[in-house]
Image (spheres, helix red, strand yellow):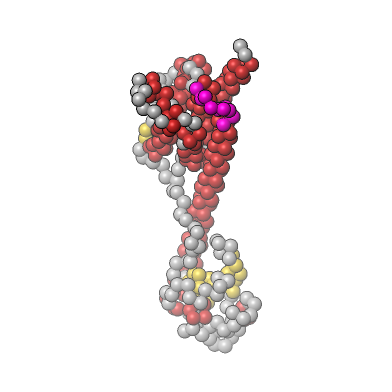
Amino acid sequence: LSVEWVLQLCLFSVLHWVLVGILLQDLSRRDKVLGGRKWPWALSLIFLIFIGSLLYLVCHPRIFINEDNQD
Amino acid sequence: MPRVRRAGFVRAHRLVSCPGRLGLGDSSLPRKNVGRFYLLVLQYCVCAVFYYLGELLTMAGWDSIDGWLLYGVHDFHRLLFLVPIIYAGYVFGTKAVIIITIIVINTLLPRALFISPFPDPLLRMLLFIIVAVAIGYLTARVHRATYRCSLLQNKLWGGQDQFDRVLDAMPSGVLIIGPDQLVRFANKVARQRFGEEVGCSYDEYLKEADIVRQLADLPVSPENIVQPEGRQGDVPVIPFTDCDGAVCRLIIIDVSR
């Protein structure tokens, strides 16, 4: 692996884990998720890079909405 | 006579829950917010498809389509991603800006790393992201501040309406005179006695009553007011700060005499 590849991998993984961290935090706070179980969502967030995050966001829009925005 | 309100004051959104409900995993989410969310998703999808349109057409075998728009430098295409980022900031706030920005970076990276033949693709992408995040964040902050301000204005106007109702219920005539010497408010008794004119000067308003003589020239005090009977000093004049910050005078006139 060249240095350039390592840097690219680092950049991808940082972005991935930041996004996964935000989404996992949201997942842990939820009482109810699509499908009823949380663990498949957690696995898909971690292992389906980017796709899992997009799917989770599309299915759970509440993460975008702060309490102040619920006008 | 309704109180004269400043032109810049706008009624804020009401905090009313929306009856319609939607959302896949968020069944309790208001319909309006879900609509906004899926509009954001649509914006992102359109931008992403446009960003990779040349590659998609090539994959589909439509090689006859050519042009700088599809295969040239994608700086313009990248700019379109500002739309979902700013929209997310305006509608949903800072957290949404961060999430959308990470998704946009993930979308832009493959071209920057593997496709673009032009110089410094990663640097140009990073510069765009920095600018986009800054704009999105500022949009979110400004919108949040505006929203809070409008909520406070609502509370303020509610308090003012309550105060006006109390003044209306008083048996004496009550006038609120602004620093520009115009009558801002007259309660029910004063309106019945002196008329319904809005925003006229107080001496015009009270000309029938012949009650105020020297308010314009002298400092505010009950001693500067002359009653019709010639008595001085028993008309209370109270300094009063109105909701727009103007220092006014609240005059209580006993009209029963």
Q: Is residue A8 above or below residue A68?
A: above
In the rendered image, residue B111, in percent from the top left (x then y), is placed at 50, 24
Q: Is residue B192 above or below residue B123?
A: below
In the rendered image, residue B92, in percent from the top left (x then y), is placed at 49, 38
In the rendered image, residue B106, in percent from the top left (x then y), is placed at 51, 25
Q: Does residue B58 show up magenta in the picture?
A: no
Question: Which span is picked out in magenta?
Answer: B115-124
Front residue of this view, candidates B64 and B18? B64
Q: Which residue is depicted at the point 47% across and 56% down? A: B10
Q: Does residue B122 show up magenta in the picture?
A: yes
Q: Which residue is depicted at the point 53% across and 43% down? A: B139
Q: Residue furthest bottom?
A: B230
- Occupied quadrant, residue A15: top right
Front residue of this view, candidates B23 and B110? B110
Q: Quadrant of the N terminus of chain B?
A: bottom left
Q: Can residue A51 be seen by looking at this rendering?
A: yes
